[in-house]
Amino acid sequence: CSGSSSPFPGRAMLTAAASAAAAAAGRRGGRLRSFGLRAVARGCSGDAAEESSPQSSGDLQTKQRIVVAVGGNALIRRGERLTIENQLRAARADAAPALLKLLKDNELVVTHGNGPQVGELALERSAATFDVLGAESQGQIGYIFSQAMAGVGVVAAPIITQVMVDPADPAFKEPTKFVGPVYGAKEAQALSDSLGWNLKADGEYFRRVVASPTPLKILQVDAVRALLAVQTPKGPLPMICGGGGVPVTRMGNDFANIQAGAFEGLEAVIDKDRCGALLAVELEADGYIILTDGGGIWENFGKPNAREMKAVSTKYLRDTKAGAKFPGSMKPKVEAAIDFVENSPKPGAWAALGDLKDASQIVLHKEGTIIKKEHTGDVEWYDRSGAPSPKDRAPRYP
């Protein structure tokens, strides 16, 4: 293997390890922590011997399994057009270095938003359904992240993801998920009349809304377990549930040319943070980080007396309805973080909201807002005396 130029030496052994991991995942349905598989994935006997040493085993045991949700707006810079070139530039400058730092010391899985991208695709192809557009956006954004990560020596593994939802979910009767750009009142009315879109007020502007059903099951989660079983600081880095995944349901009866038991896509967009929370629970992750470009959870956001939470209990967040009045989409992010912490089978599970540029410091609980089931005093605040006003850190896009 010493002469291999592949970023993953010993491909045959890696493939065998991945197959074994997938089989184990099917048998146990639990977390994969096989140090033996990790040693084989390195591909060389010297590496394997080092991996099995007491010191290295101890290092591995300190790793955390973390799911990171990156917003679709992480690929857009203020004032720039949504082109592939601009998104690549942003991913290379911001997302790739942040994810590289996290991958160095942790097991990492990435999910991402697609709001701006899927909205742009919908404008280009108004006749396409949102399940198809969602899959297309996963491919587009997965390619962008793969290019950016390759530039820092990491092999990414984007997965087109199907997510089961209930076709009887009440969300289909009352669409609430904002997608795409903002419009003025006259332009919104024109789009509604010409394309039949459902648009609602989002602040002083209007945006298209679609159904956002609750994610129930991620079909490709075992593939992620297999990739994690052989992950090193050079990858593979699973990227799954992009844009919340493609919403699908299983047909109970024959309908038209669709056979019973077949999977069928639905016209909807699943919230990526809710899907990320489900993913983190299914993977038995230690932590779930939702990255923003507006920092953690603030009280009195944008006002002179604003302050940012450092650590908080889920009870405090529920009692105060924190994030409900935050501009854009902070409320569903807070709700997703609470869902993970309260539904995780791990007693010490934590979630966090924070800025993309602070990702590595968030893991150390030095930046962002850390959310746990319990926290002494329920809430702890940062001392931001003399820091810039939080209004300067407001998200660029909801």
Image (cartoon, rainbow, N blue to C red):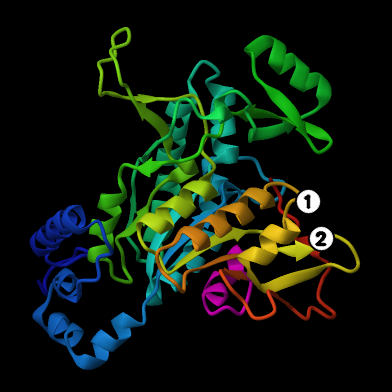
Residue 392 visible in rendering: yes
Q: Percent position (x, y) of residue 288?
A: 49, 63
Q: Viewer-proximal residue, 14 or 288?
A: 288
- Residue at which label 1 appears: 325
Question: Quick one: SS at disc 2?
Answer: loop
The disc labelled 1 sits on which kind of residue? Lys
Please state if 203 lies on the left or on the right of 258 as rendered: right
The disc labelled 2 sits on which kind of residue? Phe
Of the 4 image quadrants, the one containing the N terminus is bottom left
Residue appearing at x 84%, y 67% in the figure: 306
Taking the view exactly as shown, the residue that stands out farthest to the bottom is 55
- Residue at which label 2 appears: 301
Residue appearing at x 65%, y 32% in the figure: 176
What span is colored magenta in the figure?
Answer: 355-369
Q: Are marks 2 and 1 in contact (CB under 8 Å)?
A: yes
Taking the view exactly as shown, the residue that stands out farthest to the top is 256
Q: Percent position (x, y) of residue 175?
A: 62, 28
Q: Is residue 247 above or below residue 39?
A: above
Asked whether residue 362 is drawn in magenta, I would say yes
